[in-house]
Amino acid sequence: MPLDHVVFWVFAPISVGSAIAMLFQRNAVHAALFLIVNFFTIAVFYLVLGASFLFAVQIIVYAGAIMVLFLFVIMLLGVDREETLIERLRGQRTLAIVLGTGIALELFFAIRAGVGFATKAPANFDEVVNEGGNAVALSEVLFRDYFFPFEVTSVLLIVAAVAVMVLAARERRAVTRAEQAASPARQPERVP
Amino acid sequence: MRTPISYFLVVSAMLFAIGTVGVLVRKNALVVFMSIELQLNAVNLAFVSFSRMHGNLNGQVLAFFSMVVAAAEVVVGLAIIVTVYRRRRSASVDDVSVLRG
């Protein structure tokens, strides 16, 4: 049995299982922890598929930064209590599960028709495409063919940062001079 | 690599379907958001699998871009959730039904 087969059959059940476990966790913190497990298994898949740079990025950005942000917001809001199981729309849960199964089956048959279950990837990926290392080859494609989209993403990140500052800022009213006189404790301390 | 590429695509499809069910079923806005992240990751896995199948790196570059977009989306979405929580004292999507038709 080849090694990548073993890696796949070890990590694929963990990946799907952790995703399902995330679905059934009523506590948001536990759901976040299962999602981190799932992100790590996806990173392992990237490594098997010859995308070692994305493997590192997946762990650093997703399992590191984004999930820490999620946990930070969960702790900040204090919403680590369990959610109610009351359905506002009757039959919503059943319909959602039916729909999800339908999507999975549809994608399954699309993969069977379009790709085929026996299709194997070309064997010389690491020698031909990843020549000089995955990061070097990826940077050549990124900074040559996709240079303009790359610059556009930097604009997107700046716009997102500004948007968050606008959204998260509390309204802060300037203290008038009359209010300062009325309550002397409010006066700002003089900085030496 | 001897594993057929469709195995990875099937895992990706299953993760995407689980994420869809999560978006539709869960009530906590943060968990709904995590399910969206799961869907984005499933699509990224499909991108990388197709990149491996076709023998070029365009799929990996697109997965890279979608990670950037996901990072921006997470930041804005969490800020919106924090803002809604400040006003309503709840992160449940049932309580944010003012906009319903």
Image (spheres, coloured by chain):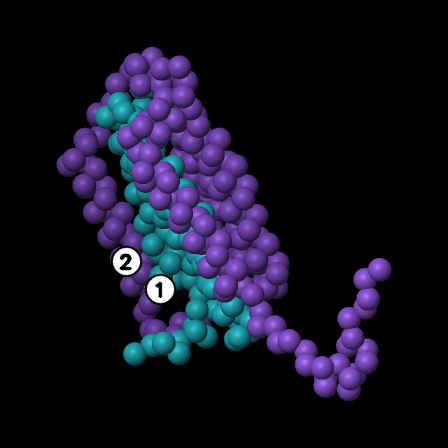
Chain colours: A purple, B cyan
Residue under label 1, please give it.
A93
Q: Position of residue B48 (x, y in %)?
A: 33, 32
Q: Is residue A183 above or below residue A107?
A: below
In the displayed structure, A65 sits above or below A4; it is below
What numbered label is drawn on residue A85? none
Could you say which quadrant of the image residue B9 lies in?
top left
Instruction: Name the subunit of mark 1.
Output: A
Residue at image point 48% right, 57% down: A162
Q: Is residue A79 visible?
A: yes
In the image, what residue type sits under mark 1?
A: Arg
- Give the class, few, some or many, for how many residues have Cα within 10 Å of label 2's Cα (few <14, many ≥20): few
Please state the horizontal and vertical placement of residue A57, each as a whole percent of the image.
47, 34
Q: In which quadrant of the rendered image does the N terminus of chain B lie?
A: top left
Q: Image quarter for residue A16?
A: top left
Task: Say which of A67 and A115 sits in front.
Answer: A67
What percent of the width, then of the height, locates residue A5?
A: 37, 23
Q: Amino acid at mark 2?
A: Val
Q: Is residue B8 left or right of residue B68?
A: left
Residue wearing tag 2: A98
Q: Nearer the viewer, residue B49 or B63?
A: B63
Q: Are marks 2 and 1 on the same chain?
A: yes
- In this rendering, the count of numbered labels is 2
For disc 1, the neighbor class at 10 Å (few under 14, some 14 to 19, many from 20) is some
Q: Please name whichever residue, A162 or A130, is drawn nearer the observer in this view of the structure.
A: A162
